[in-house]
Amino acid sequence: MTGEKLRSLRRDHKPSKEDGDLLAPGEEEAAAAPGGLFTGGRGKGGRAGGHRIFSNHQPRAPLKGGPAGGGTGPAAEPDRSGAHFPVHECVFKGDVRRLSALIRTQGIGQKDSHGERRAAQCAHLLLAHNAPVKVKNAQGWSPLAEAISYGDRQMITALLRKLKQQSRESVEEKRPRLLKALKELGDFYLELHWDFQSWVPLLSRILPSDACKIHKQGINIRLDTTLIDFTDMKCQRGDLSFIFNGDAAPSESFVVLDNEQKVYQRIHHEESEMETEEEVDILMSSDIYSATLSTKSITFTRAQTGWLFREDKTERVGNFLADFYLVNGLVLESRKRREHLSEEDILRNKAIMESLSKGGNLMEQNFEPVRRQSLTPPSPNTITWEEYISAENGKAPHLGRELVCKESKKTFKATIAMSQEFPLGIESLLNVLEVIAPFKHFNKLREFVQMKLPPGFPVKLDIPVFPTITATVTFQEFRYDEFDESIFTIPDDYKEDPSHFPDL
């Protein structure tokens, strides 16, 4: 595993921004497996006896309204008796047999009054039923984040595998709709430029820029770029082409070409057992990160130009006349937790980040992830179900390992240029970006343009890519055109190398 992947893993496993939209033969063994949710059994007096994969740390603003089945208006008080949450109660008490009966008739997506999802608390049982794992509690933490905090290696591994499996399945579910949208879209050539900046001293000197060229014909897309991989500290350059062939089988549809070495590699998005185990080691030895771009209070105001006589700023970006706007109220909220780390872990991670900030790399540090064992479980909770469910919204009793969390907020100042002349619509751009979204900076662009923007097409915009790095994206050129089909195929003189890009 390369240094680039090690760094990206330290950030990428954070609470998802998306919400997730019993015992058959073999399931009871899964529920009672070593390290499973319910190995603790029922505690005395109805106290929590199972693992707390999802706990209500760090209270935030109360949820509006009540849980499902509660009041109908904003002022309605939620039912705190627990009668509406029998599945939650079973999990809380470790009552596996009653849970196995209830789960056949109860939905698995409802939250209790503290924003907890059953999918997060019934992990082993629900994973067997392919329950969605892209869920989060009222504090924004995912099941994987809470599993890392708890420190149970088997649970972390199970959740990580299910997360990857469901991500692949989600891509395949979207495939027919995406191919239909691409087919209906005209054939075109699009060129956009990336310029990266940072407010960290000296870092801007080593940040890259890139000119991306996109050819789209039928249901095929080709992306030419010079940026192989990019994280918040390092970039890797080359002469690459990514080809998406919509007619090919899913496992054969995405290919990356190294035009300098004349080799190609198919992207399967699947990892070996060894890679998964290494990833778990890294997760268990790293901070748990959560970075969210808050757009709740975002507003757009026209940018002004001139000294004495101020007027709205309008100028050409590439070939397109555009109106410029200031983006106000954009806040980057980041949090990191480290209650699962030892002092040795913290010191080592600090040394690694200091080296990276000075232009070093992980190879110089001889960094190799050590095989991590499960942590000693935290002390059993003494909270009863009645105390938990009757607590005020957003202020549930502390469960699990004692939280060690640091939060920070940074107001992000940005400018965006909107053009009414650009031939492509935002929805069409989103369909194209969805194909190339596996690349981190393109995924950030996709997330940003999904906001409610001023009229027109965003021909130039500033977006946060990492907590310390922003990018200015400029759409320089666009034209409808037709191309030779050969540019969407692998050249005959290129040889296949399945391991040429180990991080893809």
Image (tube, helix red, strand yellow):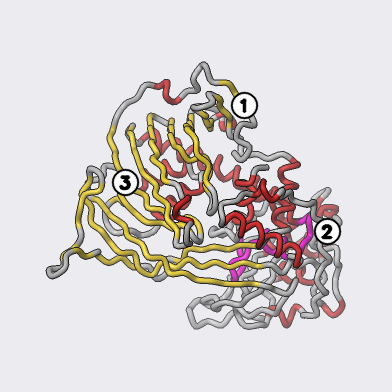
Is 20 one of the magenta-colored residues?
A: no
- Nearer to us of marks 2 and 1 is 1
Q: Which mark is residue 497?
A: 1
For disc 2, the marked residue is 35
Residue 379 vs 433, above or below: the answer is: below
Amino acid at pointer 2: Gly
Residue 43 drawn at (x, y percent): 85, 74
Quadrant of image for the N terminus = top right
Comparing 385 with 166, the one in front is 166
Amino acid at pointer 3: Gly
Residue 388 vs 489, above or below: the answer is: below
- For marks 1 and 3, give the CA distance: 38 Å
Magenta extent: 135-155
Residue 413 vs 441, above or below: the answer is: below
Is 154 one of the magenta-colored residues?
A: yes
- Nearer to us of marks 1 and 3 is 1
Q: Quadrant of residue 51?
A: bottom right
Q: Which mark is residue 104?
A: none
Residues at badges 2 and 1 in contact (C-beta under 8 Å)?
no
Secondary structure beneath label 1: loop
Question: Which residue is rendered at x = 48% and y = 29% of the image?
Answer: 245
For disc 3, the marked residue is 425
Question: Which residue is rendered at x = 21% and y = 65% of the image?
Answer: 304
Residue 13 drawn at (x, y percent): 62, 56
Is any atom of residue 42 visible in this view?
Answer: yes
